[in-house]
Amino acid sequence: MVEDRQRASRGRSRLGLLAVVVGCSLIGDPVQRAYSTWEFTARWWPWALLGLATFNLLRTAMSPASLIAPLVLATVSAAALLSAGDISTGMIIDFGLPAVLAVGGSLLIGTAVPDQPSNHWSRTLTTGRIVIPADAAGTLTLRSVLGELRADLTRKSAGSPTTVNITAVAGHVRVDIPRNRWVEVNASGALLTRITETGPAPDELPDPSTGFVIHVLGVCGSVGIARV
C-alpha cells in the first residue's frame, strides 16, 4: 500500500510538472508557441540525449562531491575572463545560463528522496546508487530502463530469505551482496541480457534460509551480482 501511494504521488508530481511546463510555454499564442516548441525539439533532441548521456557517464564515474572543486575553479576563471573582456555577455547568456540551469535541475532531481520507506527503486535514463536498509520488508524491486542502478544489499538482514525482482531494459543493474550469503538466480525472463556473478566464493556452504532469490527480467540489458 505504501509503495502504491508513493508511485501514485510520483506520477502526479511528474504529470503536474509537465502540465506547468506545457502551460507556461503556450501562454499568449498557443498555436505559434507549439509550432516553435516542435521546431526546437526536432532540432535539439540529439544534443539533449548526448548531454544526458554525458551527465550519466560523469555521475557514474564520480560522486557529486567531486564536482565541488572543479565548479569553483570554473566559476572563478569564468568571472576573471568576463571581467577581462575575453568572454562576452552574449556568450554567458547563450551558454552559461542554460548550463547552470541544466546542472542545477539535474542535481535537484538526483537528490530527491521519497518521504516514506520503499522497497521499489528504479532509474530511467539516469544513473543512481542506493543502499537497501536492513529492515526493508517484502520483495525488493530494482528496475533500470536505459539507465544504471547500483544497489547495495550488504546491510540486508539475514533473518530470512530475500526475494529480489530485477528488471533491466537496455540498462544495467548491479547488486552487491555479502560474500557468505546463498544466492539463487532465476533468469527465465532474460532476453539478450547478460548476467554475471563476481567476487570470492563463500568459505563454507551458505544457509539457503538466509540467502537471496533473484528473478531477472531483461531485454538487451545487463545484470551484475557481486559478492563483496
Image (cartoon, rainbow, N blue to C red):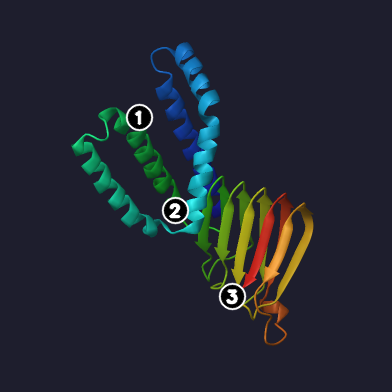
Residue matched to label 3:
228
The amino acid at mark 3 is Val
Q: Position of residue 96 (x, y in %)?
A: 33, 36
**Quick check: 142 above or below 10?**
below
Query: Which quadrant holds residue 209?
Result: bottom right
Spatial CA distance of label 1 from label 3 is 47 Å
**Quick check: 138 above or below 170?**
below
- Residue furthest bottom in the image: 204
In the picture, the disc for residue 113 is 2
Which sits earlier in the primary sequence, circle 2 or circle 3? 2
Q: What residue is at 51 percent from the left and 59 percent from the top?
A: 129
The amino acid at mark 2 is Val
- Taking depth in this image into account, of 156 and 41 the one nearest to the observer is 41
Mark 1 or mark 2, which is nearer to you? 1
Number of other residues with Cα within 10 Å of mark 1, as a class: few under 14, some 14 to 19, many 20 or more? few
Q: Secondary structure at mark 2?
A: loop
The amino acid at mark 1 is Asp
In the picture, the disc for residue 16 is none
- Residue furthest right in the image: 188
Q: Position of residue 111 (x, y in %)?
A: 42, 52
Q: Secondary structure at mark 1?
A: helix
Whether the residues at callouts 1 and 3 have beta carbons within 8 Å, the answer is no
**Residue 37 relative to residue 89: left or right:** right
Residue matched to label 1:
94
Q: What residue is at 74 percent from the left and 70 percent from the top?
A: 184
**Residue 35 relative to residue 181: left or right:** left
Whether the residues at callouts 2 and 3 have beta carbons within 8 Å, the answer is no
**Residue 107 relative to residue 129: left or right:** left
- Taking depth in this image into account, of 86 and 222 the one nearest to the observer is 86
Number of other residues with Cα within 10 Å of mark 2, as a class: few under 14, some 14 to 19, many 20 or more? few
Q: What residue is at 42 percent from the left and 12 percent from the top?
A: 29
